[in-house]
Image (tube, helix red, strand yellow):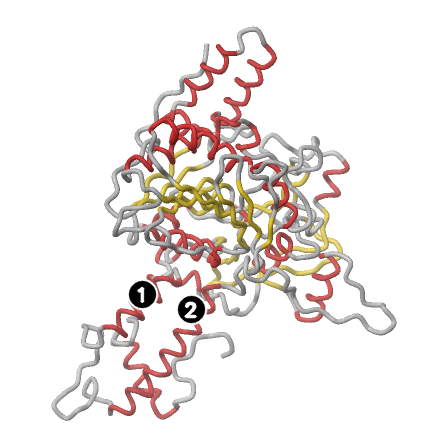
Amino acid sequence: MKNKINFTTSFDSNQVMLRSLIRSNRTLIPSSSLRSFHSVPSLLNKQKEFNSNPDSANSPTIDENGLYYGKFTKQEYEDATKVVKQQIEKLEGDIKGDFNVRDNLGKVLQFPQRDITGSTKVENLTDLFVQTIQTTGPITLSAYIRQCLTHPDFGYYTTRNPLDSRSGDFITSPEISFMFGEMIGIWLFTVWQQQNYPTSIKFIEFGPGRGTLMHDVLKSFNLFATKVNKPVNIEINLIEASKILRQEQWKLLCEEEVEFKTTEEGFNTSTSKWGNQIKWLDTEKDIINDENIANYIIAHEFFDALPVKSFQKTEHGWRELMVEHSSSVNNTQPKLPSNSNEEEINIENKELLDTEFHLTLSQKETPSSIIPSLSSRYKDLPIDTRIEICTEAELYLMKMIQLLNNTKNLGTALIIDYGVVNTIPEASLRGIYKHKFVSPFIKPGEVDLSIDVDFTNLTNLSSKFCSSFGPIDQGDWLHNLGIGHRVDQLIKKNTHDEEKQDKIYNSYRRLTDKNDKSLGSYKFLSLLPLNAKPPIGFETPAPPAPPL
């Protein structure tokens, strides 16, 4: 059957042998292990183990007659092995998803080319999706999200500054108060101390927004580094695809007279206000990893913007939810603020829930339908359960882990996002438009899309390769770092400015309170080299210390 793994394809004479190999769990990758794999790295590591150690327990048993498992000739076994390898490679490709979200900027889904009369027009993403679906059928949810956010001509992040104070759709912690970035800068300074002051470090930020967080981090880190009088060379790498946001970052991080350059390789470079070299990169693959440099990675609200695939368990197995076109459809997965109800939604918001697109359940298996069955987390879920899986999150996480140096105990990654712990994301995809939650299927390319990050999956994946600490709520982490004392200090400093005092205190509450209007429930997760000591901030939450 098309799109379904078939271990007997192309070698009809060996069908019985292949089935026997699979049943005996003695294939290249035992089926018992295969079922427990979820990530691409796990598959690759298992394959590498076999290739590097053919005499291991997974090697075939050969009897005195030279028959493999007492049944098959060497040629039969080698033919079967070739088939299994091909199917494993196909499986790895399916798990990785359609495309890497950063690699395919500039590439669009196929749609009919304009005819000579000009009747077929693509003026926005709605046109693109309608024509694509009418031509090829429903598209995957991950493809829909990817195009909405990163399409080169119509994508949300590639065509605007989403954090603009007047036209932006949301606000993040760094934009609320500089204290947020200060605390992270202090935390990175303590990691630098614990790692015995490496003389060369690289700050790497995934999705740096306007550059506000990196600005505040550098300001506080450089201040403390100067006080301890330890020599350090700091380089900055910003993973940013948007030309608009790169300009915003340059304006904030660099002096006006400092040039925004383009190298022969096509990278943008400049120098920060503190003399640090800045390099803008298109994707994480452009990062140059030097074992003598400690990589300090920040990913703030990065993972929640990655495409997800959505699945539902049926009596016939897992089926993928696809994006379908419809001239009139109710939103199938609204995630409105908890204090909203039908009477409170005004006419404008009702219109925002009307959309030309909706999710539909694929009646047959798709290439990605196998993904949920590869993890034991989803094995015992009841029929009709709906889940979201972000395969690209695993790829980015593994890249961050690769940038840590276990041998020299160098580097760290700090992941900050909204997400869930000890549960499975179900239908978390939502749109954010003018500071309100809306359907993810209205105004494609004009609405920010966000998901709940699966922190349990991130910690499970990282556990074999590095030390992880957390996740811990943002409010608790900031209190552990001493934000309460910092607020008290700032309020006392502005005794004669009551308005400024109120602003400082209100910003503090927005960063630390855990309610619908604040960000204290966001999660902090840190990654450090294997056997690293617990960093500050991730101990038992300290009680809040708000100023009097």
Q: Foreground residue, 180 or 39? A: 180
Residue depicted at 63% across the width and 48% down the height:
157
Tell me the amino acid under the disc marked 2: Glu
Residue 491 falls left or right of residue 431: left
Circle 1 SS class: helix
Q: Which residue lies furthest to the top in this view?
A: 496
Q: Name the residue under label 2.
A: 92
Residue 210 at x, y = what percent? 59, 39
Tell me the amino acid under the disc marked 1: Asn
Q: Name the residue under label 1.
A: 45
Above or below, comparing residue 369 to residue 257 in the picture? below
Residue 269 at x, y = what percent? 55, 49
Residue depicted at 47% across the width and 26% down the height:
512
Q: Foreground residue, 492 or 42? A: 492
Q: Quadrant of residue 61?
A: bottom left
Circle 2 SS class: helix
